[in-house]
Structure formats: C-alpha cells, structure tokens
Amino acid sequence: MDITSDIHSQHISRQFNQELDELKTHLMAMGGLVEKQVQDAVGALLDRDSELGQRVVDNDRAVNDMQIKIDEECTQVLARRQPTASDLRLVLAVIRAASDLERIGDEASKIARNAIDLIESDSGNRGFVEVRMISEHVRRMVRDALTSFARLDTELALKLVHEDDEVDNEYGSAMRSLMTFMMEDARSISPVLSVMWILRALERIGDHANNLAEYVVYLVKGLDIRHTDPEDLDKDMFERNP
Amino acid sequence: MDITSDIHSQHISRQFNQELDELKTHLMAMGGLVEKQVQDAVGALLDRDSELGQRVVDNDRAVNDMQIKIDEECTQVLARRQPTASDLRLVLAVIRAASDLERIGDEASKIARNAIDLIESDSGNRGFVEVRMISEHVRRMVRDALTSFARLDTELALKLVHEDDEVDNEYGSAMRSLMTFMMEDARSISPVLSVMWILRALERIGDHANNLAEYVVYLVKGLDIRHTDPEDLDKDMFERNP
C-alpha cells in the first residue's frame, strides 16, 4: 500500500509540476505575441504601413483571448491543486503578469490606431526620432522582463526596475520638445498630439515591464517590492534576503 | 468525537467566513479612500487649492499600502484555507479589484499633480467645465462599482459596463474642443495639455470602474466578460446564465 500510494503521489506531483510549467509556457507565448504587437505598432508608424497598423488592431483580440485562457488555467490549478508557498506565488504571479501583458497589448493597439491616423493625414515625421528611441528602450525592457520571468533571474529583474526611471526621463524630454513644435506651428498641433499619445503609450508599456520585473522578485524572494522606491530597493533586498 | 469534530469544523468554517468578510471590508475601505482621492484631486483643480492637491499626492502612499495589505491577506487565505468554487472566485476578484483601485489612486495622484501645475501657472480655466462634467460621471461610476461589489448586484454592474461608452464619448468630444483652444491661442498649449492629461486620467478611472463591475459579474455568475462587446453582453448573459 505504501509503495502504491507513494507512486500515486509522485504521479500527482509530476502532473502538478507539468501544469505549472504549462502556465509559464503559455505566459511566455502570450509575451511573445505582445512583444510582436509593440514592434509592429511602432513599425507601422515608422514605415508608414497602415495595413500593418490595422493588423495590430485586429490582433488585440488574440491577446485578450490568451489572457482569459491563462486566467482560467490558473483558477483551475488553484481550485484543483490548492498550491501553497512558492507554487502559490507562481500562480498568482502568472495571473498578475498576464494582466500586465494584456495592458501592454492595449497600448500597442492604441499606438497602431494613432499611427494609422498619422499616416492618413500625411503630416510629416515630427517626433518620430523620439518614438524610435523610446520604443527601442521599452521593447528591450519587455523582452528582459519576460526573460527574467522565464529564468527567474532577479538580477536582471532589479536592473529593469532602475531602467524605468531612464525611460521616464526620455519621455519627459521628448514631450517638452514636442510642445515646442506645437507652439511654433499651430498646424502641427493635431499630428503632434497623436505622437504624444504614442509616447505616452510607450511610457506605460515601460511601467508594465517594470511590474513584470517586480513579480519576478516577489516570486523568487517572496518579497513584495511594488511601491518601493528603487533607491531603497537594493538596501531592502539586502536586509531582508534570507 | 463526532460532535467535537463537527463543532470544530463549524468553528473553522465560521472563522473562514469571517476572513472572507474581512477581505471585502478592507476592499471597501480602500475603495472609500480612493473615491475621496479622486474627489479631492478634482476639487483641488476646481477650487484652485494646491494644498489639497499636495495632500492627494502624499496620500497615494496610503492607497499603495492598502493594496499590499489586501494582497497579503488574500495570499494567506489562499494558502491556509485553500478555497474552491465561489470562495476562490471571491479571493481572486478581491486581488483584481484592489489592483484596479490602486491604479485609480495613481490616476488621482496624476490629476492632483497636473492641478497643482495649473494653479501655479494661473492660466485661466479652459476645459474646467468638461473636467467637472466627466469627473462627476466617472466618480458616480466608481461609487456604483463599489456598491455593486459590496451587494453583489450584477444588474448595477452591467449598467456600468454600458456607461463606460458614454464617458468615452464625452471624453472624445472634450478633447476635440480643447484642441480647438490650442489652435486658436498658442499660449494656451501648455495649460490645455495639462487639462488633457487630467481628462485622460478621468477616462482611465472610468475604465477601471468598468473592470470592477466586470469582476462582480465574474464573481456572481462565474462568467468572464472581460473583452466582451457590451452589445453581445446581455445576449451572452442570457444564453449562459444558469
């Protein structure tokens, strides 16, 4: 009896680990799609490709569907497996991460819609340099956030939390120079506003990448660093690490 | 022995229900604080009270602390009680709702910071009528969302999901008239942009109220209506209701 029950419990535990791995795999697949949506949305603007922009808008549905599916899987794992400790933290981190990925998808869709407006109004390329620069930075953040999640790499995750401040600075300075364009030429107001919305969306994507990185720390260290000042963070990590 | 164990399990279940009630109570307390933050942020602008604005910015920390506390309580309930079915849905809905309330708090803080800028630059009150109108609408949505959560009132929740479209329309028309101000007078660009950020924040608050309403439906019906077109919703509810 003991051996049978042991084999049985090993079997359950193998299945459970498989389910947890699947959650991570599905999250990474969603992350890959969302990365591509951001890349295509910005590409649509820079290459003046409104068809590509429309594809991004249309694909947002697929992103939403993936979030619902991941949420359902997480809920089932919670109900059937009743995980505790680090397994529980993993499932909760996946739920949170999927929600941030879905919001990154929303922002990509907003970028694409503004890109289509800009292409159709054929109004020059003021601010495109800034869009390109910030988008590259932010896309790298999303990629690194997903990598840190896949590898549970807290060092990479903590680097990201600091990096978000840099994006905020780049964003602030881009917004100021765009405002100057507006003041110099009233006809530029409408297109420059569209570029501002795009920059705003990129800045928000940086925030979500930052959130993803925070979940990795929560997952590995069991430490909730949301709302902690990045400057206090290393100190806090050091003092509270096991 | 049977009676003792029965009393024991009744005791556990009473304690558990108490814990679930506490989660709801704490979420409502957080909701109350967040409602007040939105009210004060808009009040700071309309009454030109930058001290009040600064208080909103400072209070954001209290909102963040409440989210962390609620999240910890939810995680503990999941780990210790291992809830299933509707109890599990409640805990997950509380985690999600606390996250949306925290983001409403962020938006209130952004409104307050822009209000302080506007008060200090002493630049007239263009767009204030629109801010007042949309803020009243959005605050009513937040209040109704919290009420529908407290009473598990899906009828009120579904009303809200439709209302979000109205706010989006009001927002779009306000943004268009603000753009006209900018084009007519280049000196108005900077203050009008601040008003635009405030309107954007209000529109986002409406989205979060909408999310809260969706969690109520999820909670009561076990039906995930996120990303469902409001027009399909009543039909969908009808077809899938138990």
Image (cartoon, coloured by chain):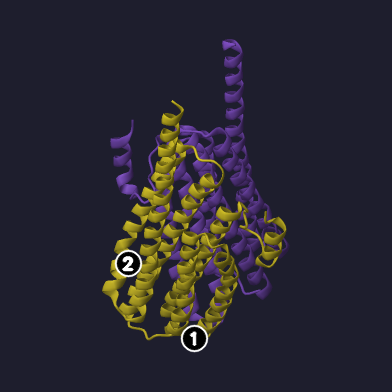
Chain colours: A yellow, B purple
Instruction: Specify few, some or many for label 1: CA neighbours under 10 Å numbering under 14, 14-19, or 20 or more.
Output: some
Q: Are marks 2 and 1 on the same chain?
A: yes
Q: Position of residue A157 (x, y in %)?
A: 55, 65
As drawn, B223 above or below A30: above
Q: Could you tell me which residue is drawn at 65 percent across and 71 percent down? A: B117
Which disc, if any, is residue A181?
A: 1
Q: The residue marked by circle 2 belongs to what chain? A: A
As drawn, B216 above or below A56: above
Label 1: which secondary element: helix
Q: Nearer the viewer, residue A160 or B115?
A: A160
Is any part of residue A83 visible from this angle?
Answer: yes
Q: Could you tell me which residue is drawn at 45 percent across and 79 percent down? A: A131
Question: Is A143 displayed left or right of A89 in the figure?
Answer: left
Q: Position of residue A95 (x, y in %)?
A: 47, 50
Residue placed under numbered mark 2 in the picture: A56
Of the two numbered discs 2 and 1 in the rendering, the one whose residue sits closer to the viewer: 2
Q: Nearer the viewer, residue A101 or A106?
A: A101
Label 2: which secondary element: helix
**Residue at the far bottom in the pictured view:** A184
Q: Earlier in the sequence, mark 2 or mark 1?
A: 2
Is any part of residue B156 visible from this angle?
Answer: no
Instruction: Specify few, some or many for label 2: CA neighbours under 10 Å numbering under 14, 14-19, or 20 or more.
Output: many
Q: Quadrant of the C terminus of chain B?
A: top left
Q: Please name the amino acid that badge 1 sits on.
A: Phe
Q: Could you tell me which residue is drawn at 32 percent across and 57 percent down? A: A62
Q: Could you tell me which residue is drawn at 45 percent across and 84 percent down? A: A129
As drawn, B201 above or below A65: below
- Label 2 to label 1, Cα distance in Å? 29 Å
